[in-house]
Amino acid sequence: MQNKDKKDVSVTGRVTEALPNTLFKVILEGRDEEILAYLSGKMRMHRIRVLIGDLVMVELDPYGGKGRIIKRL
């Protein structure tokens, strides 16, 4: 169940580096900036693997900080 009060922005990006504890460095398409992103709970639960070079959908927090990988494209 999603909270509609949040104003999260979803963008696509490409994974460039895999870090420990399911953290990834992702370059956002169209913005040319690199962010840290972590796997969402459902992706962990269903054991969806994310590899370097994969195209992913990232949900960005409006206040900055880390993003959350919600989908592998």
Image: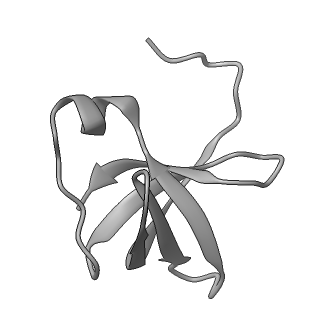
Q: Position of residue 33 (x, y in %)?
A: 66, 82
Q: Position of residue 11 (x, y in %)?
A: 51, 61
Residue 35, compared with residue 31, is above or below; it is: above
Residue closer to the observer: 68 or 18 = 18
Q: Examine the image and state in which quarter residue 24 appears.
A: bottom left
Position of the N terminus, as image quadrant, is: top left
Residue closer to the observer: 68 or 9 = 68
Residue 27 located left or right of residue 62: left
Marker count (numbered):
0
Q: Position of residue 59 (x, y in %)?
A: 54, 48
Residue 2 located left or right of residue 64: left
Residue closer to the observer: 40 or 10 = 40
Q: Position of residue 18 (x, y in %)?
A: 38, 71
Residue 13 located left or right of residue 53: right
Residue at 53%, 58% (x, y): give it: 37
Residue 58, compared with residue 16, is above or below; it is: above
Kindly give the residue lying farthest to the front in the view shown.
20
Residue at 34%, 63% (x, y): give it: 56
Looking at the image, what colour scheme do you see?
one colour
Residue closer to the observer: 24 or 63 = 24
Kindly give the residue lying farthest to the right in the view shown.
63
Residue at 61%, 19% (x, y): give it: 4
Residue at 64%, 81% (x, y): give it: 31
Position of the C terminus, as image quadrant, is: bottom left
